[in-house]
Image (spheres, rainbow, N blue to C red):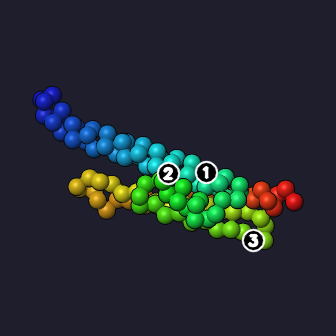
Amino acid sequence: MVTAETAMVLPLLVAVALALVWVVSVGVAHVRLVDAAREGARMSARGDAPSEVVEAVETMVPDEATVEVADGQDDGTTRVTVRLRARVDLPLVRRLAVDLDATAVSANEAVASS
């Protein structure tokens, strides 16, 4: 009788373990996005060109991520946004995906010092 109960519960435990691993991997991906957006905002605040910022941020994030750098001309700030659609790579649940994004804003040093 214990064997039958174990056989019934074991697939559920495996599914829960896989779900937890996926949730942790999504959390790690989000932290990577936040770090990359902050670094891009720092680079932009120092006066680096937007193309250099995008190139540097793209090296820090997964290949599927998109990077946007928006220069706020009126208020002297720059906004760096990184977006990623995180998908499950398991055969039974390929349609499950989460949209992640991170945004960082920095004041441009040239504007702030004047």
From the image, which quarter does the C terminus lie in?
A: bottom right
- Characterize the local packing of mark 2: few (<14), some (14-19) or many (20 or more) Cα atoms within 10 angstroms: some
21 versus 68 height, above or below: above
Q: Is residue 11 visible?
A: yes
2 or 1: tag closer to the N-terminus: 1
Find the distance from the CA under tag 2 to the CA under tag 1.
Answer: 9 Å
Estimate the x, y position of residue 106 in percent, counting from the top left. 71, 56
Q: Indicate the secondary structure of the residue bearing disc 1.
A: helix
Q: Are marks 3 and 2 in contact (CB under 8 Å)?
A: no
How far from the left and from the top, in percent, is residue 32?
51, 48
Q: Amino acid at mark 1?
A: Glu
* Residue 73: numbered disc: 3
Q: What type is the residue that disc 2 sits on?
A: Met
Instruction: State the residue lying farthest toward the top.
Output: 2
Q: Which residue is mark 2?
A: 60
Amino acid type for the residue under numbered disc 3: Gln
Q: Quadrant of residue 47?
A: bottom right
Which element type, helix, strand or loop, lies under badge 3? loop
Q: CA distance from mark 1 to mark 3?
A: 20 Å
Q: Which mark is residue 39?
A: 1
Near-viewer residue (32 or 98): 32
How far apart in space, not on screen, are marks 3 and 2 (Cα)?
A: 27 Å
At x 46% / y 49%, what residue is drawn?
29
Q: Is residue 106 visible?
A: no
**Horizontally, is 71 left or right of 14 in the view?**
right
If you read the primary sequence from the N terminus, does the residue marked by circle 3 or circle 2 appear first? 2
Quadrant where the N terminus is found in the figure: top left
Disc 2 vs disc 1: Cβ atoms closer than 8 Å?
Answer: yes
